[in-house]
Amino acid sequence: MKKTIIPFMFILFAVNSITAQELTTFFSKSDSFFKANVVNDKVKYAAIKNDPKSLNEVLEIAKGISISKSDATQYQAFWINAYNLLVIDGIVNNYPLKSPLDVPGFFDKTKHEVGGKSITLNGIENNLLRAEFPSEARFHFVLVCAGLGCPPIINTAYKPATLNSQLQKQTVLALNNPNFIKVNKNKVQISQLFEWYKGDFEQKGSTVEFINTYRKEQLPEKAKVSYYPYDWTLNETK
């Protein structure tokens, strides 16, 4: 009996060790990639197109990683980074272009090999993140769709140990940004993001109440809310 159990436990330990090493490498290489290619909330698509080696390396690692949602922060950090990297990869593969919407099926048809799955960008966002963690509306402020209307992309990777503080920081930054939440006395213009995902933001009250949870200067209680058009212009820097 012992002869069969010990090898099995050894194999299980070895597999877990390999996965842990791959994840560590994934987060490290993702961090280096974002540091090198994101400047002032925008992406150096042309430079990546000319030298895609670092992007290809990190995506190759991500392809073989299998990760369980039982470790929520590790799982979420992996898929947030994977989403942002794959968006950049999708732009680079079709560069030059003015908007991700110039590519038919960019979000809902094109499948990517990542995390042991073949999945679209919408699949990552809606099935692997939003559906698995329905109370976490802060995802919307860290998943970056390559348009200027998206919350800004940061020049570091999201990591398990710092994920909660990173989610909080990006949500606070977005909801206190006067270009994102436009206030004129009692009139408030907000991104169509809040219209498209209204249910995510109104789980515990109104959209205004959600926004005020993160704002330093509260929106009026009876604010007249409208949505401004989403800007799909490419979030590019040269």
Image (cartoon, rainbow, N blue to C red):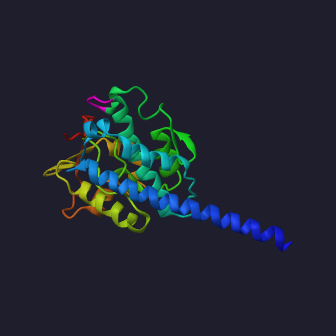
Q: Position of residue 161 (x, y in %)?
A: 42, 68
Is 139 located above or below residue 5 in the figure? Answer: above
Judge by depth and name the residue closer to the eye, 175 or 112. 112
Residue positioned 47% across, 32% down in the render? 110
Does residue 77 show up?
no
Judge by depth and name the residue closer to the eye, 164 or 54. 54
Q: Which quarter shows the N terminus?
A: bottom right
Q: Which quarter shows the C terminus?
A: top left
User: Which residue sits furthest right?
Assistant: 1
Residue positioned 45% across, 46% down in the render? 59
Residue positioned 48% across, 51% down in the render? 129
Q: How many numbered dots are placed on residues in this image?
A: 0
Is 126 located above or below residue 202 in the figure? Answer: above
Is 2 located above or below residue 75 in the figure? Answer: below
> Dominant secondary structure of the magenta stretch?
loop
Q: Is residue 96 covered in magenta?
A: yes
Q: Position of residue 202 (x, y in %)?
A: 39, 53
Say which quarter of the image contains residue 237. top left
| Left or right relative to 57: residue 181 | left
Q: Position of residue 180 (x, y in %)?
A: 22, 48
Judge by depth and name the residue closer to the eye, 112 or 195. 112
Say which quarter of the image contains residue 145. top left
Residue positioned 46% across, 40% down in the render? 122
State which region is magenta: 95-99
